[in-house]
Image (tube, helix red, strand yellow):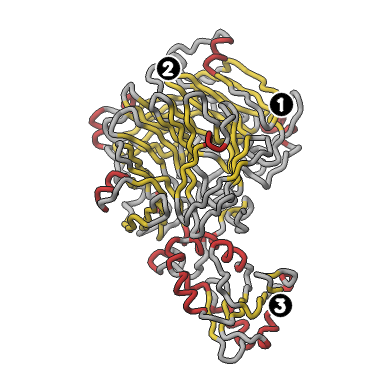
């Protein structure tokens, strides 16, 4: 029961139409549209091919159709609700009192066929569903991506002292936006609106914080767990809403973090771990549309096996569902993995792992691509791109932490994963290498990096390093460049854990291959760094590991600026560090900046800037000896 809507294409980016019709404020105007269309008969004119997408999100069975008309001759082999497509030139013979034009900014489209309208017929268009003018950035083009910079956050505040905090920055102001604003709508688990508000954003690159505890107090709300819908207006630069999402508690042992939800619902997601002994894995499903997810609309299956178990209950519009993995796939255990047939019903979901010791950690699944096939050129690129696609992640100090790696298939066509691991110390020296071979899609190969170092007789002591997952074609196999893994970190002292997942890129190469090395601003290659490291409020310290991965030999050392920045984006202090090529730098903010500097920057962030190389970063918070969090960073 997948939705037949286009949300995102890698060659085009995000599709604003589904965001426009699925916006919460558009959904509220549906009764107005229905009243305008009346009892019929209605001729539906679909000049841009939007009718099917509209019908996916809204029940249009009440429409009394007198005919279905199209403009594109190539669309004449189609139909809508049993009505065969007719050319719009047949419209004069239609006995319709109302012409429903399924398009926004429809005046010009209506003018093109006005001479064909039946006498006395009234014209109704999708402009009836427009969001308020105040929420538009580009008022000349309603379906501009700039008008729908939206995203969802998993937002909750519980009676047992668990809270969530969203942290971002007004990076649109850094691109020249003069007066961006934020509109928020908080839904509970049943999809009912708990609160909504709008606010001016602070100055360029200044910090944005939305704290569940503060929202709960302000609106006098009961405990909640649901979706916070975010819509930023008046923007420039790009239409992606990025944020860090911290889960924190009244007690120091509650601490975890993840990040933005990826605003385009996907057909498939992968990278959901099965529970380990003594664990409970909960998948959070946030319905991202104004229509219910029907029973049987979401399925789970063990990775690599066609044994889908379907969710047997409906999820209401904009509702949130907690799905206990073990209730549906009770035989699975870590390191087995699960993929989710999401049917484009929801944005990238989070999962939460509860342990027998009462600890919790949160992370996210990733988009499982259905448009990728193995690329036969990738195995041939070593002479040009060196190590090619790399997936770097921290090795936290092994005396305190255990580091685990679980490769995850992340494309529907991917039947094997030819992989290897390289381990490096902080200075970029290779410590160990491991060939994983040609792993099958349903593999259960977990790599205990800490144990591997011990087996190799390598001791980091209290130091750190990093691991790189990369392709290894010694045994053959295919590769698509969409290489992912789950990285899990366990504190040997407190018993707390954190995990994160991400995908590979080509790093620090002057040569370009299919949009790699990726550049977030301008065309590739991306050879510079701009990362956002939010500061934890008292009593939390802030943790960061910067990795300097290099597919090809690059500058021997980085020239990395760490700029301590206040909440208003003012510079407080700066440090420069040199990271060895192929090495990494692990630090706490309290170790680099004085107490006075940190106090002056309270509520701010560290801007990590390097114009000589592309760094990859991981960030988190530290709650004394009780808990820590870790996730990969974002830039703007």
- Left or right of 472, for residue 249: left
Q: Which residue is mark 1?
A: 438
Identified at 68% across, 32% down, the residue is 441
90 or 431, which is in the foreground? 90
Identified at 67% across, 20% down, the residue is 435
Residue density around tag 2, few if under 14, some if 14–19, many if 20 or more, within 10 Å: few
Of callouts 1 and 3, the N-terminal one: 3
Label disc, if present, on residue 86 of the rendered structure: 3
Q: Residue furthest bottom?
A: 119
Of callouts 1 and 2, the N-terminal one: 1
404 or 575, which is in the foreground? 404
Q: Quadrant of the C terminus?
A: top left
Does the image show residue 174? no
Does the image show residue 367? yes
Q: Quadrant of the N terminus?
A: bottom right
Q: CA distance from mark 1 to mark 2?
A: 32 Å
Q: CA distance from mark 2 to mark 3?
A: 69 Å
Label disc, if present, on residue 492 of the rendered structure: 2
């Amino acid at each position: 029961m997948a939705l037949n809507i286009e949300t995102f294409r890698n060659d085009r980016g995000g599709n604003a139409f589904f965001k426009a019709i699925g916006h919460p404020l558009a959904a509220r105007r549906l009764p107005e549209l229905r009243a305008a269309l009346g009892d019929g008969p209605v001729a539906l004119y679909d000049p841009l091919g939007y009718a099917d997408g509209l019908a996916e999100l809204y029940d249009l069975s009440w429409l009394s159709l007198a005919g279905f008309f199209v403009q594109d001759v190539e669309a004449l082999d189609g139909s809508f609700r049993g009505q065969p497509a007719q050319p719009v030139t047949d419209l004069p013979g239609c006995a319709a009192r109302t012409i429903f034009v399924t398009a926004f900014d429809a005046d010009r489209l209506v003018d093109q066929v006005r001479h064909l309208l039946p006498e006395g017929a009234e014209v109704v268009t999708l402009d009836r569903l427009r969001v308020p003018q105040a929420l538009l950035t580009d008022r000349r083009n309603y379906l501009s991506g700039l008008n729908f910079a939206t995203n969802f956050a998993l937002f909750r505040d519980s009676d047992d002292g668990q809270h969530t905090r969203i942290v971002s920055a007004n990076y649109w102001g850094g691109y020249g936006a003069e007066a961006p604003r934020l509109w928020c709508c908080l839904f509970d688990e049943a999809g009912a609106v708990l609160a909504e508000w709008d606010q001016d954003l602070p100055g360029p690159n200044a910090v944005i914080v939305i704290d569940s505890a503060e929202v709960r107090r302000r609106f006098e709300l009961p405990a909640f767990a649901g979706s916070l819908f975010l819509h930023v207006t008046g923007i420039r630069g790009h239409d992606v809403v990025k944020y860090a999402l911290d889960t924190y508690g009244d007690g120091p042992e509650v601490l975890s973090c993840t990040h933005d939800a990826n605003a385009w619902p996907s057909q498939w997601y992968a990278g959901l771990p099965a529970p380990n002994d003594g664990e409970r894995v909960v998948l959070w499903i946030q319905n991202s549309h104004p229509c219910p997810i029907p029973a049987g609309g979401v399925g789970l299956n063990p990775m690599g096996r066609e044994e889908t178990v379907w969710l047997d209950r409906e999820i209401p519009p904009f509702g949130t569902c907690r799905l206990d993995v073990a209730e549906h796939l009770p035989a699975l255990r870590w390191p087995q993995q699960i993929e989710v047939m999401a049917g484009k019903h929801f944005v990238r979901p989070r999962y939460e792992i509860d342990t027998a010791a009462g600890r919790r950690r949160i992370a996210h699944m990733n988009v499982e691509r259905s448009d990728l096939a193995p690329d036969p050129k990738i195995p041939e690129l070593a002479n040009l791109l060196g190590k090619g696609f790399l997936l770097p992640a921290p090795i936290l100090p092994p005396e305190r932490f255990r580091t685990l790696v679980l490769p995850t298939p992340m494309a529907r066509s991917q039947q094997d994963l030819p992989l290897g691991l390289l381990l490096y110390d902080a200075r970029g020296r290779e410590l160990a290498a491991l060939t994983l071979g040609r792993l099958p899609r349903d593999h259960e190969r977990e790599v205990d990096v800490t144990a591997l170092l011990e087996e190799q007789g390598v001791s980091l002591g209290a130091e750190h390093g990093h691991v790189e997952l990369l392709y290894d074609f010694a045994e053959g196999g295919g590769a698509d460049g969409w290489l992912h893994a789950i990285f899990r970190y366990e504190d040997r002292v407190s018993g707390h854990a954190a995990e994160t997942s991400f995908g590979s890129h080509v790093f620090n190469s002057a040569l370009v291959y299919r949009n790699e090395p990726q550049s977030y601003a301008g065309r590739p290659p991306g050879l510079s760094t701009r990362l956002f490291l939010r500061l934890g409020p008292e009593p939390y310290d802030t943790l960061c590991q910067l990795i300097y991965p290099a597919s090809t030999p690059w500058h021997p050392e980085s020239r990395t600026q760490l700029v301590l920045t206040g909440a208003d984006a003012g510079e407080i202090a700066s440090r420069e560090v040199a990271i060895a090529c192929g090495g990494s730098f692990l630090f706490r903010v309290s170790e680099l900046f004085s107490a006075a500097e940190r106090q002056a920057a309270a509520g701010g962030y560290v801007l990590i800037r390097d114009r000589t190389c592309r760094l990859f970063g991981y960030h988190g918070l530290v709650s004394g000896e009780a808990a820590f969090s870790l996730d990969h960073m974002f830039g703007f």
